[in-house]
Image (spheres, rainbow, N blue to C red):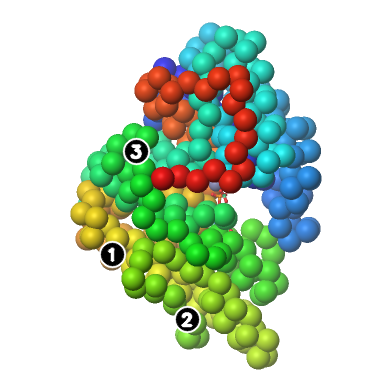
Amino acid sequence: MKILGIETSCDETAAAIVEDGSIIISNVVASQIDIHARYGGVVPEVASRQHLLTIMPVISEAMTKATWHDINGIAVTFGPGLAGSLLVGVNVAKAIALAKKLPIAGVNHLEAHIYANWLDSFPSSSGEMGKVNFPCLCLIVSGGHSDLVLMMGHGQFEKVGRTRDDAAGEAFDKAARILGLGYPGGPAIEQAARSGVPCLSLPRAWLKESHDFSFSGLKTALWHLVHKGEISVADVAASFQLAIVDVLVAKAIEAAKQLKVAQILLSGGVAANKMLTQHFLAKSPIPVLIPPPHLCTDNAAMVAACGYYHLQAGKISGYDLDVVPSLGLG
Ligand code: KG4
Ligand code: ZN
């Protein structure tokens, strides 16, 4: 069963074809990073206009690896994300579904991130190839979310932790702006941290009574550090990165132990961070699955993989499918 996935929730215009929820036939991502970088972050109006320009060429490129005859369904992200951006993907998906008489699955972007773990095979910390075992604990760390979600089976989610303020990716982006490192902040901080030492003391919000996260205090502490003068940007970047990694790793492992899950599944743009994945693999007694970096950041292959399980379960969206910018998971 081949699914065409479409993703336009933020600043990546993406289309992909995935077979049986796991085999990537094509995976095309047109990033708008260069366009938004000059403004220091995503400009929603610019993003939706850019999606409009790019969506058809991106779908055409993905479709060079299949004919419309081969496609059994369409999966599209309908939330969460920027309303104007989501609208482009959802309306294109509905138009194609109508014209080609294909079923359509509206997909939650956060759920789609998790399904990057079903794509490709990669070894987990215990050496087993990337096969998901339920129940698992999903850590979704992106530009807008830092969620811990218990997954009991396909389509069965229960949120057990979330950020109370900034998301992990948002914290990276804001810290990079304070340090003058540009956008997006995660890769910029990771790069700067390579030549630094995590020698500076920065706070960690443990929120021990819950599985929630908080990163705004860390960001404020960084701001004070930078405005005190004389600092090494590389050392600050390394110290900041370690502070985020320490909290994400320790809290996810603690929650996984408490909930007695079989696996921890990482996903979202921040899961592309090398230090985060290395710490998880070194410290977790529970097997950890981590998608390769290009499947952690926004893409449509994860949307197609997720849509496959929706359509298999008979969850077909109607032509009244609409965007839900503040959609949550679990
Ligand atoms: O999942 P994603 O591509 O888009 C959203 O759904 O938000 O995540 C984007 C976020 C950005 O905040 C970006 O700075 C962060 O992921 N990110 C990283 C890395 N690559 C992307 N954060 C830390 N280290 C990275 N290597
Ligand atoms: Zn995302």
329 or 185: nearer the viewer = 329
- The mark found on residue 203 in the picture is 2
Left or right, 108 with respect to 320, comes to left
* Crowd rating for badge 2 (residues with CA inside 10 Å; few <14, some 14–19, many 20+): some
Tell me if residue 277 comes above or below residue 64 in the rendering: below
Q: Classify mark 1: helix, strand or loop.
A: helix
Instruction: Give residue 156's mark.
Output: 3
Callout 3: SS: strand
Q: Is there a contact, CB below 8 Å, between mark 3 and mark 2?
A: no
- The amino acid on which the numbered mark 3 sits, given as a three-letter code, is Gln
User: Is any atom of residue 260 visible in this view?
Assistant: yes
At x 25% / y 41%, what residue is drawn?
A: 133
Q: Name the mark nearer the viewer: 3 or 2.
A: 3
Query: Residue 35 — which label?
Result: none
Does the numbered disc 2 mark a residue whose Cβ is under 8 Å from ligand 1? no
**Which corner quadrant of the image does residue 57 belong to?**
top right
Q: Nearer the viewer, residue 118 or 220?
A: 220
- Label 3 Cα crowd, 10 Å radius (few <14 / some 14-19 / many 20+): few
- 130 above or below 312? below
Q: Secondary structure at mark 2?
A: loop
Horizontal side, residue 292 vs residue 250: left or right: right
Q: For residue 254, which numbered disc appears in the image?
A: 1
Q: Check contact, mark 2 vs mark 1: CB within 8 A.
A: no
* Quadrant hosting ligand 1: bottom right
Q: Position of residue 33 (x, y in %)?
A: 69, 50
The amino acid type found where label 1 is placed reads Glu
Ranked by sequence position, the earlier of labels 3 and 2 is 3
Q: Mark 2 or mark 1, which has the lower sequence index? A: 2
Is 148 positioned to the left or the right of 193 in the image? left
